[in-house]
Amino acid sequence: MSAEVTELTEMELLTLKESMLTQKALILNKSHEFKEEQSSMSAVAEEAEAASQDIANNISIHLHERDRTALYAIERALGKIADGTYGQCESCGECISARRLQARPFTALCIECMEEQESHSNIFQ
Ligand SMILES: [Zn+2]
């Protein structure tokens, strides 16, 4: 129990989710432009909302490494939001502070576990 750890409010979580969906739509939109010259932003946004991991996998073939990595991070975070585990540290299970999540929405570790991991090795970075 740490007093400094403030959990995200529902509103803040929604804001983060919105921004993730926007980022995802932008990445998917890029891949659409890559394949064909169609770009209906609203259609892509809907697709982003509905896209399954399979679709993301297929689309990602057309993406650059950086976009693919980002897309997976977004998928992962959105999945956690969906099942209610977003904001929990994957290592210790404690809540990650709202400030940290807002600065690094795709982080999977609380600051303590991150520092712990970094002190042991940078191989996984
Ligand atoms: Zn932790």
Image (spheres, helix red, strand yellow):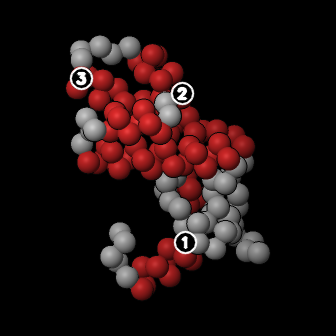
Residue marked by disc 1? 111
**Picture coordinates of residue 68 (x, y %)?**
33, 45
Circles 1 and 3, Cβ within 8 Å, touching? The answer is no
Q: Front-most of 10 and 24?
A: 24
- Give the SS element for disc 1: helix
At 70% from the left and 49% from the top, the residue drawn is 84
Mark 2 residue CB less than 8 A from any atom of ligand 1: no
* Three-letter residue code for mark 1: Ile
Q: Mark 2 points at which residue?
A: 50
**Number of the label disc, if any, that sits on residue 35:** 3
- Dot 1 or dot 2, earlier in sequence: 2
Q: Which amino acid does label 3 sit on?
A: Lys
Residue 98, position in %: x, y? 63, 57
Coordinates of residue 32 in the picture (x, y in percent): 30, 23
In the rendered image, which quarter contains the N terminus? bottom right
Apparent side of residue 105 relative to residue 56 in the rendered image (left or right): right
Of labels 1 and 2, the one closer to you:
2
- Give me the residue at 33% from left, 76% from top: 123
- Circles 3 and 2, Cβ within 8 Å, touching? The answer is no
